[in-house]
Amino acid sequence: MSYIIQSMYGGIVTTLLNALGALPVFFIKKVNQKIIDIGLGFASGVMITASFTSLIIPGIRIGGILPVIIGIILGSIMIRLIDKIIPHLHSIIGFEGKPTDKLKTIWLFTIAVTLHNIPEGLAVGVGFGSYFIAEAWALTIAIGLQNIPEGLSIAFSIKSIENVSRRKAFLISFLSGIVEFPLSLLGVLTVSIVHQILPYAMGFAAGAMLFVVSDEMIPESHRVGHEKSASYGLMLGIIVMLILDVILG
């Protein structure tokens, strides 16, 4: 039960830090795209490193390399299928999924952001379900930190898409992050009930996060000429995650 409670705390932390990132939308008219791309690079670096230090390597220690590899493959396939089936919109990459004219642009963008947060929420829950608590908290704090620039990017992107109010932009950014809380609970409950699937689940969460980073976050940050700055952000994210892992581990 203590692991489940800690997973709940973890889900709350990541959700609140996402909201913290969105707060500047109340006070600032516009954020330079370069800053957003650096933030996306930072988030990418954190997620790449966390996938290995908090999920893949502990998963191999628990169940060996084969279950983790199977999980990584299944996680990446899941994200690809979701991308292909569910209609959503990225600010630079553009439209993905099945064509639709029933959803407004703002909701297509919100769906895209929510899809990003699915593997993050699962990763937090699976991390606590592994009983590697130090690594789980390192992962939680790292995902929370990378949620700050994500929340910033989401809020200002939503505000610019249809010129919505600041309050609505903040609310949508906040709601898109809330999905991490129930998914963290789902992750920890699943691996607690069926402990044998833990290494598969750890690989699954890592594969899903890595696919999102490679398929969407890095390309998104490299499309308007800020590749070098985004890459520096990525390196900073790697360094921060490594420091967290050492301090908390």
Image (spheres, rainbow, N blue to C red):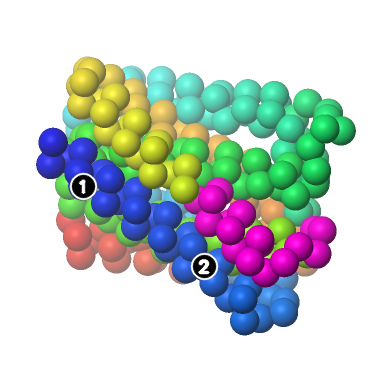
In percent of the image, x 40 and y 24: which residue is there?
71
Horizontally, residue 56 falls left or right of residue 217, namely left
Horizontally, residue 209 falls left or right of residue 126, namely right
Given the image, on which type of amino acid does mark 2 rest? Answer: Gly
Give the image location of residue 156, x and y in percent: 68, 66
Residue in front for this viewpoint, 162 or 74: 162
**Residue 68 location, quadrant:** top left
Mark seen at residue 21: 2
Secondary element at tag 1: helix
In percent of the image, x 69 and y 76: which residue is there?
31
Give the image location of residue 10, x and y in percent: 30, 51
Given the image, on which type of amino acid does mark 1 rest? Answer: Gln
Give the image location of residue 20, x and y in percent: 47, 68
The answer to whether 174 is drawn above or below residue 25 in the figure is: above
The answer to whether 182 is drawn above or below residue 65 in the figure is: below
The answer to whether 74 is drawn above or below residue 118 in the figure is: above
- Of the residues under marks 1 and 2, which one precedes in the sequence? 1
Q: Is the magenta stretch mostly helix, strand or loop?
A: helix
The answer to whether 60 is drawn above or below residue 228 in the figure is: above
Mark seen at residue 6: 1
Q: In which quarter of the image is the N terminus?
A: top left
**Residue 123 location, quadrant:** top left
In percent of the image, x 53 and y 29: which residue is there?
76
Horizontally, residue 83 falls left or right of residue 7, namely right
